[in-house]
Amino acid sequence: METTIVIKNLTKKFGNVIAVNDVSLTIEPKTFLTLLGPSGCGKTTLLRCISGLEDPDEGEIYIGDKLVYSHVKGVSIPSGQRDLGLVFQNYALWPHMTVYKNMTFALEIQKLSKEEMKKRVTEALAEVKMSGYEDRYPREMSGGQQQRIALARMLAYRPRVFLMDEPLSNLDARLRMDMRTELKRLHHISDATTVYVTHDQLEAMTMSSNIAVMKEGVIQQMDTPDKVYHFPANLFVADFIGNPKVNLLEGWITGPDLVDLGKFNVPVFTFSHTGDVVVGIRPEDISVSTHAIDGGVEFITYSVLPTGADTTIIARKGDTELTIKEIGVSKLQMDQKIWLTFNKDAINLYDKATGNLITH
Amino acid sequence: MAVISNSRLSASEKWTAVMRRFLRWLTTPHVILSIIMLAVMIYLVIIPLYRMIMTTITVQDIDLRVLKDSEVGDFTWYHWVRMLTSKIAKIMTYEPLVHSIVVSLGATMFALVIGGLMAWMVVRTDMPGRNTIHMLATIPYIMPSWTIAMAWTVIFKNRTTGGTPGLLEYILGTPPPDWLAYGPIPIIVSSGLHYYTFFFLFVSAALLSIDSSLEEAGELAGAGRWRIMRKITFPLVVPAIASGFIMTFSKTMGTFGGPNVLGVPVKYYTLSTMLRSNTGIGNYGDGFVLAIILILFAMTTIMINQKLVGTRKSYETIGGRGFMSQKVKLRNFKGLLTGMVVVFQFLIAILPLVVLLYSTFMLRTGDFSLSNFTLAHWIGKGDISINNGEPGVLRNPKIYLGAWNSIRLSLLTALFTSILGVILGYAIVKGRGTRLSKLVEQMAFIPYVIPGIAFGAVYISMFTKPVGPIPPLYGTFALLVIVSVAKHLPFSARTGVSAMLQVGKELEEAAAIAGASPWRRFVRIIFPLTSTGFVSGFLLNFISTMRELSLIILLVTPTTAVLASMTMRYIENGNEQQADAVILILIFLVLIGNFIISRFRGGSLKKGLGM
């Protein structure tokens, strides 16, 4: 089941609002692509355009080698013939049907034999660890169980493409963690091309093979989670990804590999760039020393927030504030003098005017 | 795979693409259904309205006596001039208009005061027996609107109109004054007592849904009880009061029964009764002028309402659990007030029925003694000295025909209304946000602003002549069904929409993804999930059609007469006891229907009210 999804110049408007703005992207076979962004960024609309539940206004969509939508050619294949499955945020299990009926609804349309249907249901339920729930009605199950059934319903008809629209957002934190594990596992086993929509960066980071970060209908960056985290393509992506948030500081390049931030300088690879810049430093790329060290910048701790596994430290120098993350429980006190050093390799530099990452 | 730009396509390819897109749009289920519904509604509402307007500005057969040089169908302002500026305009138009306004406004205010006060007492005080009070409050509304009017005449009539005395005169020996026997006061009181249920239900629901924390916040801010009531509670129930006001006002404007029973005998005409007397003699040109005035009046009222209490002020009062921590303590007045409410409810819910029943056992009207007792009006074989020789109602084939007509009219109306409800609901909800959907929704709303009797009048003009392939339907039973279904369109749309909204759109989308055709989605997903809503809508339509009078009074003939219209005919012929017996049969049927409903849905009448 090698299915590529190709989207070309896709635009979708709702009245005057442009939900998806001239998006082009190629989703390689077996990819787990997450569309990530704040609410209203167009990620769900893009997913619905792929599914055929929404008709775009411009552009083309191919699933495999089949043209499923083209504005200029006037083509739009109905959802049911696109060979894809969709898991909805609110599960959308039909309340008047048992689990078995829910799962065989599509299979009946495909005119599968009774034995085959039974086999598929049994298998799919086993895959989501819900064996034996065939005769339950949706309302007789918990939210987490309903979610698993919704997933099993999709698995039972074995589509080439899995689409998921914030499937975990109605679950509590604990269940969400379990389901992330299961979903990643399921994708690993099935190898179906998956498009997953979420606003939760942790979900995106943990499960995806690729992340497309969206804002205002435009894809800001599409890359592996690693790249998106360590080399955000612009200030929006840098700011959106990461918890605690990245430190973004305005400054200007004063010499080769040196940026003046007003109160202090940081060493940065400037790639012979000049002018006003924004420096992006992840909290974990700052080291703390409790005594003055060579090249250390003096700060004062403002607040120390341990979580157990790590500690978030807010430090100030005048009106410059930095967020620092240390592994383990920190011994630092509040209002204590500290000296900070920065990991030059991990610092990203952004053009202040365009907000784009500066690379060589 | 490079993107195919528009310019590289040939003209014919572009044309094909445009056609494909258009066809795809056209074959979307909700679009097809919307277009069908638009066609149906244009036929049922727009064309009749147009015909009615045209009738008022063209020469009719009946006008040829006056307009000697004209031919039928010529353009003329004759009817408008006659009805608005001639010498008879005062009697024909302005007096009835004033009467209509007086009666409607009076009845509405009366209903508001009673309904609002009772709602407040039931919800906000520690009055006992609230469930019983709540149940009793719906009874007057379940009965036909002119029930109380008919009971009124039995009790209060005097001999002004040359008839026999009423119960009061029989007991006291002196006749009640004219103002109490006939005219505006009795009409206002009897309609007000019918419609107070609206206010009671609306206001009590609004009061119940107010989040008590809103009032507690006021209390913490140091406001007194009276101030909280004025500044917080009252503004929050204003939308409920306003919508009850408009609904009652426009209903009473178009109502026929009460004014016919209590107004016409003393020549106190309202627009509705005047409209009837014009169309009754075939003077459609003049009658329709009145109908149009009535429609314009009702429309204006509703528009004013929407301006005043627009969406901005219709607060969502969600969030409250509807639990009031503090109730007003009635203390010493508890017993007294409770007693008053109970007596009042008894007077308007039970007494009319008792009085009506009693009157059917009277051989001669006006003699309330036991020696006058007879069963002739129920089971008499037909004595020429009683009721012009008509047999008792239970032996009278006309009554059985009328009852059968009532039942089948109600069944057919309810059936078609439900079907239209499904279609309208689907078309409107699935097309939400498109202009087409909005158009369908708005058009379905039109019958709401047309008062019942005027709506009936609209249909005379439409169906006296053939329209396209459809034969003239005037005088047929089918016409009664059509007019009832058309008048129920707003109700259909509303039930349909709310039933469809209950089915999350994802449920249908999930089926679409699974490859189900629109038809399959409807049969397997949408219909099973909405059917309960439609069944209860069906039953409510059934009983509301059963007691409908104003709508069909202009359209019935002796063979298509229903029980409701028969009560009027018997009254007009002076056969009071038979009229009373017929309305009791009608009430009996309605109560059976209502019993089935309460069985079916736990007795909530609120949702079904309003059309």
Image (cartoon, coloured by chain):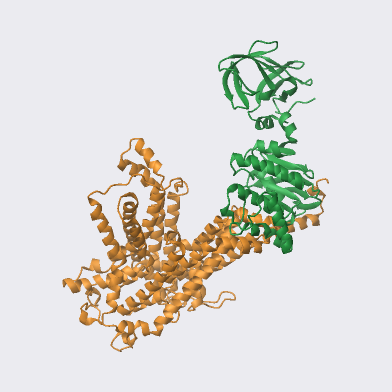
Res B461 seen here: no
Q: How many marks?
A: 0
Placement of B439 over or under A236, stated as above or below? below
Q: Residue furthest front?
A: A132
The hue of chain A in the figure is: green
> In front: B370, or A73?
B370
Residue B497 in the image: x percent, y percent?
54, 58
Where residue A294 sits, quadrant-wise, is top right
The residue depicted at 31 percent of the width and 82 percent of the height is: B377
A253 left or right of B149 in image: right
Q: Residue at x 23, y 73 (%)?
A: B166
Vertical side of A312 occupied by B400: above or below: below
Percent of width and height locating residue B515: 70, 58
Residue B288: % across, % down: 44, 69
Q: Quadrant of the C terminus of chain B?
A: bottom left
- Residue at 58% over, 49% down: A142
Q: Quadrant of residue B522?
A: bottom right
Front-most of B202 and A295? Answer: A295
Q: Is residue A211 above or below residue A73?
A: above
Percent x, y for residue B212? 39, 44
Say if residue A46 shows up in the picture.
yes
Supply the letter of whichever chain is orange: B
